Amino acid sequence: MSKIKIIYGHDTLCGWCFGFTPTLDAFVKSHPDVEIDIVPGGLVKGDRVGSYADMADYIAEAETKMTRVTGRAIGQPFRDMLQRENAPLSISAPPSHAILQMKDRAPDRALEFAHVLQDEHFLNGKDLNVAATYDEICEAHDFPKLDTYAIVVATEETPVVAESYAFSSSFGIQSYPTILILSEEDTLLGQINSEYEPEAFRVRFEQIIEAATGDKAHAI
């Protein structure tokens, strides 16, 4: 059968994407032949942008459900960050810009980078609006060095970010994580939303491939 591709509608500030990481990592290991294109979609933009301190109550409530469903818990350093008077700005553009840079410089490691970046944020409370966060991550994990100035000044109007957000929107992606399964010819075969159990996700993927192509070659 032709090569299958996945578009991963993602946002670094999305706790549900953080919860989805182990499921997608397991899928990548069992399906190394499936190309995954991580596409930042812009969850926190426009009038949603604001201090993390103003979102503390909402995040605490959402975290309880996210942890129950996905099995992943946010780290105490992140919770502590929310309580600071000088809590960082919650805005998707800087980490989106960083991921898009990594897609350009090391496309085969872009998903890995996105997952490390998200873990550093949600587990260790790293501020995604300062250059040092990206420099430290790239050095610690041997990623290519990024243009951190471009990252920290990025907004949703920054061309590369705006293009990614528009690309995500063109597929109708409105929530995160969203998985779109495409043929090699970019025909949409199916979509997976809100599936956080690795085996259930794998089964759903196989069902979509079989229904679309009649091919069981990927089944394990």
Image (cartoon, grey):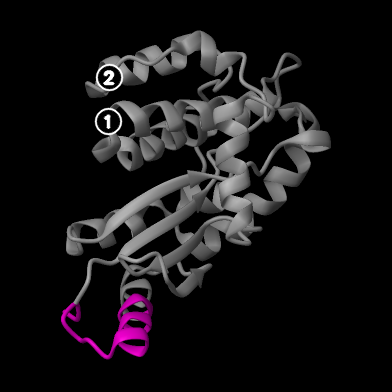
Q: Which mark is residue 144?
A: 2
Q: Is residue 63 left or right of residue 138?
A: right
219 in the magenta segment = yes
* Span highlighted in magenta in the image: 204-220
Q: Is residue 193 left or right of residue 182?
A: right
Other residues around mark 1 within 10 Å, as few (<14) / some (14–19) / many (≥20)? some
Residue 78 visible in the current orientation: no
Where does residue 94 sit, x and y in percent of width and height?
57, 24
Q: Marks 2 and 1: CB-CB under 8 Å? A: yes
Residue found at the far front of this picture: 185
- The quarter of the picture where residue 35 lies is bottom left
Q: Residue at x 69, y 45 (%)?
A: 60
Where does residue 183 sit, x and y in percent of width and height?
34, 69
Helix, strand, or loop for circle 1?
loop
Looking at numbered disc 1 in the image, what kind of residue is underneath it?
Answer: Ala
Please name the residue that numbered disc 1 is placed on.
106
207, above or below 130, in the image: below
Where does residue 108 sit, x and y in percent of width and height?
24, 39
